[in-house]
Amino acid sequence: MATIVVEGGTRLEGKVRVSGAKNAALIAISAALLANGPVYLENVPRISDVLVMLSIVHDLGAGTEWESEDCVVIYPPDSPDFETPYEKVKQLRASNILLGPLLAKVGKAHIALPGGCNIGSRPMDLHIKGLGSLGAEISLQQGFIKAKANGLKGARIYLDFPSVGATENIMMAAVVAKGQTIIENAAKEPEIVDLANLLNAMGARVRGAGTDVIKVEGVAALSGVRYAIIPDRIEAGTFMVAAAATGGDVLVENVIPTHLEPVTAKLREANAEVIEQDDTIWVKSNKALRPIDIKTLPYPGFPTDMQSQMMAMLAVTPGTSIIVENVFENRMQVADELKRMGAKIKIQGRTAVIEGIPRLEGAQVRASDLRAGAALIVAGLLADGATEIDNVHYIDRGYENLEQKFRGIGARISRNE
């Protein structure tokens, strides 16, 4: 089983280029099924989640090929299959974003539930509520979400929580529904705006993406298109935090600075220097870091996907810092691995109290999820000695060429197969 080994004590310095956004790529591949011609997606990262999603849409009848290193072409079928196989879906929790396109294209969808997914959880309830309002009948049978619709009709839908996945599914179903759909308390994430831009480029009529009210006017059909997805703000944020934590001097390229404002604000509060330019962010940290408090919230609040990396940095920041996780209840698991490296962290429910120490110690640790894996790399950079990280398949789900990129800015990091 592969592991990543990080030798600590290195200051990061230089330039690093961010890949396309994982979450934007996954939803764009799903949305491509709606088109009646080829969809060329540029700036797509070659990561395991993307490869699994491409395999799933291929199983549904779509043709797929890589036109270049970062451009994938999807040839949507006229009538795709409507059932996704459990063996692949269990590798990708985001597979439920196929519900909307399949309902819109063929009026039926059987999506295998990923392992551990609870249909009664709030996020899935919102998918069912929203698509049900458009006229779909949805049930849970034998481990599948089974949905069918004899024509979708526009509706006014209020989301009890601004769920990204539910907003995306409703948008994709609504673009070819009859009449107008209004989504209230919609998610505002940059990936939502990117999806709306892609759909509009295909001929949809979506307005208001990026606000809490999205209006969709149904159209008869969508066409093929060439479209470049946005850069990955979480990958960018990971490098920004790593630079600040190591006292580094790093220019992060291929970013949209406004997408990173919550991270930028907290790094500045922690005493790092952050300089924003058109498509780059320069992070310099030559002063002692200060403790900060963080509360994760839906965008434009501080992203839950960045709190693990921040926790690693705060573990060696003098003073007491507090992180409150308001989005996912299991996002604090990385604390146990950081404590194996000597960190002083107390978890009370969804709150972490972090007492900064001078330095972490290298240890054998295990990634419990994608962002925890990235956080442990940051922690390894800050530790005395070597840190060996297991379960690196989680890291591969969301970061393209991560070790090479870190080595390019001075990290001593390697992979043992």
Image (tube, rainbow, N blue to C red):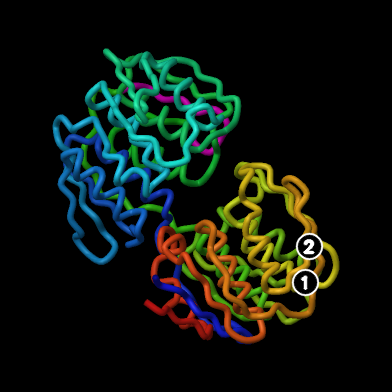
- Which quarter of the rendering shows the C terminus? bottom left
Q: Nearer the viewer, residue 193 or 49?
A: 49
* Rendered position, 399 above or below 145: below
- Residue 380 left/right relative to 355: left
Left/right of residue 299 with respect to residue 389 in the rendered view: right
Label disc, if present, on residue 394 of the rendered structure: none
- Disc 1 to disc 2, how far (Cα)? 9 Å
Disc 2 secondary structure class: strand
- The amino acid on which the numbered mark 2 sits, given as a three-letter code, is Ile
Residue depicted at x 30% and y 25%: 103
- For disc 2, the marked residue is 354
Q: Position of residue 246 (x, y in %)?
A: 66, 79
Mark 1 vs 2: CB contact within 8 A: yes
Name the kind of residue labelled 1 in the image.
Thr
Q: Which residues are magenta?
A: 209-218
Residue on which the image places disc 1: 317
Q: Identify the residue at horizontal 32%, vertical 62% (top origin).
A: 46
Q: Compared with residue 344, is residue 124 higher up or lower down, i.e. above or below? A: above
Answer above or below: position of 51 versus 246: above
The residue shown at (37%, 13%) is 135
Q: Position of residue 284 (x, y in %)?
A: 66, 77
Q: Quadrant of residue 323?
A: bottom right
Residue 286 position in % (x across, y down): 73, 82
Q: Secondary structure at mark 1?
A: loop
Q: Is residue 127 above or below residue 389?
A: above
User: Which quarter of the rendered picture does the N terminus lie within?
Assistant: bottom left
